[in-house]
Image: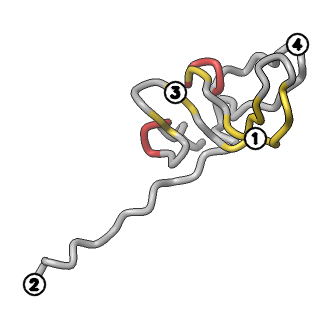
Amino acid sequence: MTTARACRDCIHFAGRLTCARPVGSHWNAAVGQRRSRLNVDVGIERSSQRSLLRKRRCGPEGFFFEARMVTADPEVKQ
């Protein structure tokens, strides 16, 4: 059994409770702009419920999860 990965450890986690993973870019005539990122609450993105538009979500298993890179401190001397 695997444990769920926390959104705060994902590179797409933005702000305090927002998922900003990349999505397919498309023109939205209603607002006159091109959208290329999500801007949704992490609770919605990790929900197991599907949306009316059948958009694929990360879900409880973290399908779109990408771990943050941990960089070594160059000042550390051994």
Residue in view at x 58 percent, y 52 percent: 66
The residue under label 2 is which amino acid type?
Lys
Q: CA distance from mark 4 to mark 2?
A: 55 Å
Q: Which residue is mark 2?
A: 77
Q: CA distance from mark 2 to mark 3?
A: 37 Å
The residue under label 3 is which amino acid type?
Thr
Q: Which residue is mark 4?
A: 52
Work out whether 7 lies above or below 65.
above
Image-quadrant location for residue 75: bottom left
Q: CA distance from mark 1 to mark 2?
A: 41 Å
The residue under label 4 is which amino acid type?
Leu
Spot occupied by residue 34 in the image (x, y as percentages of width and height): 77, 36
Q: Is residue 1 left or right of residue 15?
A: right
Q: Which numbered mark, 2 or 3, is in the foreground of this view?
A: 3
Residue at the extreme left of the image, as rendered = 77
Residue at the extreme top of the image, as rendered = 52
Q: Is residue 59 left or right of residue 29?
A: left
Quadrant of the image containing the C terminus: bottom left
